Amino acid sequence: MSRRIHDEAAHLVAAGEQGAGWKEIRRAAAALERPLSRVVGPVQALLQRTPPDDAQHAELAAIASDCDVLRKQVDELNIAVRAATKARSGFKQTGRMLARNLTDLMETTRALNARHTGGGADRYRIIVVDDAPDTRFLVSAVLGPFAEVESVGSAAEALILLRGGTTFDVVVSDVMMPEMGGDELARVIRADPTLVDIGIILLSGRSDPAFRAAVIHETVDDYLVKPFDTNELTARALRLARDARARANLRRRALTDALTALPNRAAPVEQMEHHVRSRTPDLSVVMLDIDHFKLVNDSWGHAVGDQVLGKFADILGQQADAPRLAARFGGEEFVLVLPNTPAGEALALAEALVAEVASHPMKTTAGALQITASAGVATLNDDDADWSGLLARADLRLYQAKDAGRNRVCA
Ligand code: GH3
Ligand code: MG
Ligand code: MG
């Protein structure tokens, strides 16, 4: 889209006010119609591709009726433009009427997007960033039928959304914006370890090959030059969203223990590194190990052993609201990473956990089994250069607890 919807409407109004010639008015009207037809086209195409026996039929029927309203509004706009060009008078009123119709059109499209994106937690989530409201509107309308779209007018707003706790799959951003450009936004996103999986597309009137090559090489996944083809944008955005999801799922699986659903060994190591680096005060760790777990396996079988591990993990997980972390360190060994927790508090927590395990028989398919566990507690001190000494002390104390008779804590 080379000209913006609002700009074209404003141009039409101004042309009318200045008593411009018939040709000028016609040109402005045609320029307005082109981006509008690009909004409706992809929506209609989606409807045609969806078979009538599809599960989403009712939802799509509702969208179809919204599309009809949209079409009528576009038609009304065209009639008004034709009347204005024929009459060659009253341009000012016509301009105002066009502006009103444009507002209606945008409302309808917004409602249509909201309806189609309602529900479905697994829908792709896309952020559209552009300082020009009509480009934002157009891109949102194009992607709306395929993904949940949030649109914002600046890079700063995009970062607030991205860091607000909701996971997004793709960012589609303009390049030239006041304050922070799309290329800079891409650099900030790439530098944030919590946003590594997200796909980035730049969408810009800036077409010089050297700049495009540089940002594609450095930060972004894709670059489209305006005026862009709406089907191509949709295809590229959805491909990126699919890739981003796949990366995020792989990462999650690589970091999660499949049996207990607790984080695996990688997470506590990363957390301890982070806390040591940022000098988080009172960093404590608790190492826990189930007592005589081999006996459970030998007496009741591996499947029952697995159930015990699951129940034990549930108990630990309840102690691990962020920033605390519970993880399966390996086998029947677990670890708690406790930032801002002085030694005495960590010891009390470990003792409470060990007591809870000992006082609640675990329900398994082999009946309720009485399990106990032992724990070792350590807190980071000034002599620790890294987390390895801290963990080694906790481990040593865990074995002291075992030697001292199990079902107890050493600190
Ligand atoms: P201690 O009180 O000294 O800790 O004795 P223990 O029997 O608990 O310890 P040991 O290290 O001798 O045995 C641990 C057992 O845990 C051996 C291993 O087969 C079992 N194990 C490790 N991972 C799993 C698992 O994922 N599922 C099951 N069922 N067993 C596991
Ligand atoms: Mg054990
Ligand atoms: Mg063990």
Image (tube, rainbow, N blue to C red):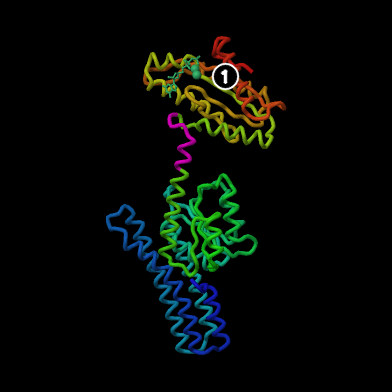
Who's the residue at 54% across and 85% down the image? 16
Q: Which residues are magenta?
A: 249-259
Which residue is situated farthest in the right direction here? 382
Q: Nearer the viewer, residue 272 or 288?
A: 272
Q: Is residue 403 above or below residue 70?
A: above
| Ligand 2 neighbours mark 1 (CB distance < 8 Å) | no
Residue 150 falls left or right of residue 63 = right
Q: Is residue 303 above or below residue 197?
A: above
Which quarter of the figure is the C terminus placed in? top right
Is 254 within the magenta?
A: yes
Place residue 214 in its image quadrant. Answer: bottom right
Image position, residue 376 (x, y; %): 59, 19
Image position, residue 339 (x, y; %): 64, 31
Residue matched to label 1: 375
Q: Nearer the viewer, residue 376 or 393?
A: 393
Is 229 within the magenta?
A: no
Who's the residue at 55% across and 26% down the image? 335
Question: What amino acid type should be assigned to the residue bearing mark 1?
Answer: Ala
